[in-house]
Image: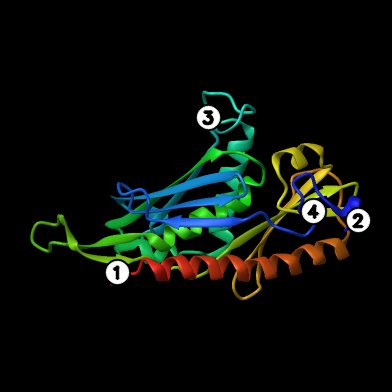
Amino acid sequence: MQKENCRPDGRELGEFRATTVNIGSITTADGSALVKLGNTTVICGVKAELAAPALDSANKGYIVPNVELPSLCSTRFRSGPPGEEAQAASQFIADVIENSQIIAKEDLCIADGKLAWVLYCDIICLDYDGNILDASTFALLAALKNVQLPSVTINEETGLSEVNLKQKNPLVIRKHPVATSFAIFDDTLLIVDPTAEEEDLATGTVTVVTDEDDRLCSVHKPGGSPLTGAKLQDCISRAITRHKEVKKLIDKVIKSIKPK
């Protein structure tokens, strides 16, 4: 193999790091997943709470994502309020949820104008080694697929909600968004799934999110060097291939823990 096409960790330019996913490991959450992308390790826990729907969307529930990059995951982050990168990642995840329609918010409504589910999706990075967006998107999807919500009814006489913990139902996952990130070097070179070191050296990054119908959900490109249309097209087709791998991985894990 040519020396110049080899990356510091021995990968080829188009090669992803080893990817693993575990689901249901946080027993206190309503759904959870742990994703590793090389050394980058992210955990997502979903907590469901009941609330009144907003007045202007009486038939919808809420999904509230939050990405945390605590100081324990890397020397680059300080303790205290969320920094720029964590805020940008949270916004990215919120956009993915919105654009991909991973869950229809109408599905989270229990009684129009009265009661709906709020899903708090906390994504916490345990070890930061680049490409937080791919890992976070994957962890979110896997955790949501693991969620079981108790059935809730409103008692006609008292108007109070009654929760039946014995009867639980999975969420309806309507789309499976998968993110694929690239580091750009001087408009010419694209490498997939960058490590923290590669991100620091890159002149730009781009993240492409696709779903199982090969539909483009979003392209996230925070500044940096420009991308030609042809290069972007290349990114999209690679993202579509990556989607199939990730989807296969999730399906396999979910199948393995189905209650016997």
What SS does tag 4 mark?
strand
Task: Return the residue at label 4.
Answer: 191
Q: Position of residue 59 (x, y in %)?
A: 37, 63
The reply to whether the C-beta atoms of the residues labelled 4 and 3 are less than 8 Å apart is no
Q: Which residue is mark 3?
A: 72
Query: Separation of disc 4 and disc 3 at Cα?
Result: 27 Å
Residue 247, horizontal then vertical, whole percent: 55, 68
Residue at image position (46%, 48%) is 44
Q: CA distance from mark 3 to mark 2?
A: 37 Å
Which numbered mark, 2 or 1, is in the foreground of this view?
2
Quadrant in the picture for the N terminus: bottom right
How far apart are labels 2 and 4 at the CA level? 16 Å
Type of amino acid at the residue the image marks with label 3: Leu
Give x and y (percent) for residue 6.
83, 51
Which residue does the numbered mark 1 point to in the structure image? 259
| Residue annotated with mark 2 | 2
Crowdedness of circle 3 by 10 Å Cα count: few (<14), some, many (20+)? Answer: some
Identity, as a three-letter code, of the amino acid under mark 2: Gln
